[in-house]
Image (cartoon, rainbow, N blue to C red):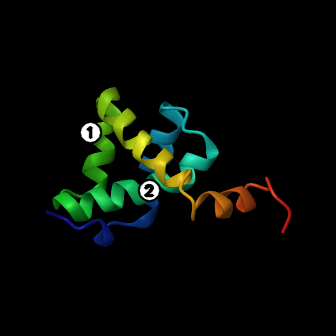
Amino acid sequence: MTNVTEMPTAVITAELEAFKSKYKVPPDVALTISSVFYNTEEDTGVPARVWVAEAMKDEELANCLIDAAKKVANSEHVKPVIDKLLGRVDS
């Protein structure tokens, strides 16, 4: 299997952008979704690119991955950073 780190960044970025667009992923979740795919790759040995491709075909899988990204985005340590990045709080 090809490790995601061996792929051109633009390829996986384009695939992630297509995923976020297809499933209308909100901005805060969009900031964390790539980490969910990469962590899933680490846990399973299946490249993130494959997970993205499968999720593009399987709405239930996509929703599970989006739910995981929502949990990260709303976590105690990440939410304040995302809010700041998105201009929701003052510096």
Q: Position of residue 24 (x, y in %)?
A: 55, 33
Q: Report whether 77 appears left or right of 60.
A: right
> How many other residues sit within 10 Å of disc 1, few (<14), some (14-19) or many (≥20)?
few
Q: Report whether 33 appears left or right of 82.
A: left
Circle nearer the N terminus (1, 2): 2
Q: Amino acid at mark 1?
A: Glu
Q: Residue at x 47, y 48 (%)?
A: 71
The foreground one among 81 and 11 is: 81
Q: Residue at x 17, y 58 (%)?
A: 44
Q: Quadrant of residue 78?
A: bottom right
Q: Residue at x 25, y 49 (%)?
A: 50
Q: Position of residue 79 (x, y in %)?
A: 62, 57
Q: Amino acid at mark 2?
A: Ser
The residue that label 2 is drawn on is: 34
The foreground one among 70 and 18 is: 70
> How many other residues sit within 10 Å of disc 2, few (<14), some (14-19) or many (≥20)?
many
Report if residue 11 is visible in the image: no
Whole-angstrom CA distance, mark 1 to mark 2, is: 15 Å
Q: Residue at x 71, y 56 (%)?
A: 83
